[in-house]
Amino acid sequence: MAPPTFAWDRRSLRELEANFQDERSSRWMYLALADLDGQRDRADLLRRLAQYEERHASAWQALLERLGHRPLRAGRLREHRILVGLARLVGVGAVLPILHKGEVDGIEKYRRQAATWADPHAQAAFREILPDEVAHEVDTFHEARKVAAGHGALRSAILGANDGLGSVLALAAGVAGATASSPAVLIAGIAGLVAGAASMAASNYVSVKAEQEVYASQVRLARDALEVAPETKRAQLAEAYRAKGLTPAEADALVARLADKPEEFLKAVLAEAHGIGEASFESPGRLAGYTGFAFALAGLVPILPFLFLPALPGVLASVGLTAVALFFAGVMRALSTLHSFVRSGVEMVLVGMAAASVTYLIGLLVGTAVA
């Protein structure tokens, strides 16, 4: 066997091993999700994706063995176990955006590796795997888009809860630092809670309404362009798919398949060729209500201790309770990514505590100056 032309260092070998582990674990994840999914067409898609992942794992395993490295026994990655567990709780449809993001991240990782791993056998593997990964990304994007409209309420609630916890804690800490009076903190906290909830609800209403209007305008323009110059739009979409790694033949075949479904083709042109994602079509008023209610509910957490405790002990108890709630909010935010749940939770706690510390110190200084 001819020696490889690329000098594999320890880091590259670890990444190669990680590729194998990830593909094999992804196969298990897709099969587990297919077994949980009650929609037959989507379950069939997940099983097809599992077959591709097994083929990719075999390609990486063959490369490892060619390099004289026996791959470790493939296990189930923690993030994949968490995702399957989440699907058991909230349904497969709810985790499709996470699957799509995972495919996007996988494409970027493989592109980076393909640009640096000059081994001809590795390059052959990338030529086989990258088009599959791009096709997976397209499939998961379209499936995620079908259910995305139903999750606007969750996004709005998380947005409101995050803001309610952080802003009301900062307000309560500032007033406590200035007055050392629990009744004053309660009055200010409740006022801030009501004002913040109303402001967040209004902002979300305007934002969602504007997003829907902009998207509707873009749809009209794209539909007019399709009627006037359909071949130009087909060429743009095919070019976008080629930029993602598909061969010209694969890109043309995918475009032809989408062209049979005019509305899907239109959405694909907007998303892939112009980078315009589909807007939520839930009621702006209802989403605004979710945001305001979540803000108010979460905003109660920082001020509850002041019902029972003096100002300084109340601040300490408020910080403790809010830190727990912020960590949970960070975990909920991480559901839209495959990043560390712990890291996201800790990040939320640190940001919230930093804001509360600043306002407490300002309140303390102002209170001292006034006194």
Image (tube, rainbow, N blue to C red):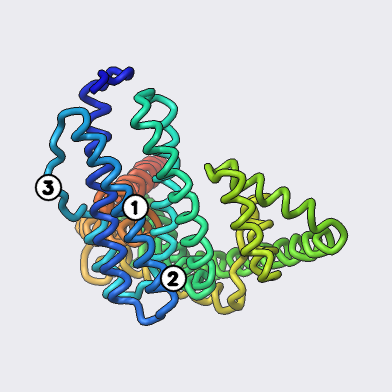
Q: Residue at x 45, y 56 (%)?
A: 136
Q: Residue at x 63, y 46 (%)?
A: 240
Q: Secondary structure at mark 3?
A: loop
N-terminal of the two: label 2 or label 3? 3
Q: Is 268 on the left-hand or right-hand side of 95?
A: right
| Residue 337 horizontal/vertical position (percent) | 38, 54
Q: Evaluate whether residue 364 shows in this view.
A: no
Q: Nearer the viewer, residue 222 or 297?
A: 222
Give the distance between the C-alpha atoms of the residues marked 2 and 3, in whole angstroms: 38 Å
Residue type at mark 3: give it. Arg
Looking at the rendering, which quadrant does residue 246 occupy? top right
Q: What residue is shown with label 3?
A: 73
Q: What residue is shown with label 2?
A: 154
Q: Secondary structure at mark 1?
A: loop
**Quarter of the figure that contains the C terminus:** top left
Q: What residue is shown with label 1?
A: 338
Q: Evaluate whether residue 47 shows in this view.
A: yes
Residue type at mark 1: give it. Leu
Q: Residue furthest right?
A: 228
**Quarter of the figure that contains the N terminus:** top left
| Residue 259 horizontal/vertical position (percent) | 68, 64
Q: Residue at x 58, y 66 (%)?
A: 204
Q: Secondary structure at mark 2?
A: helix
Q: Is 201 above or below relative to 315?
A: below
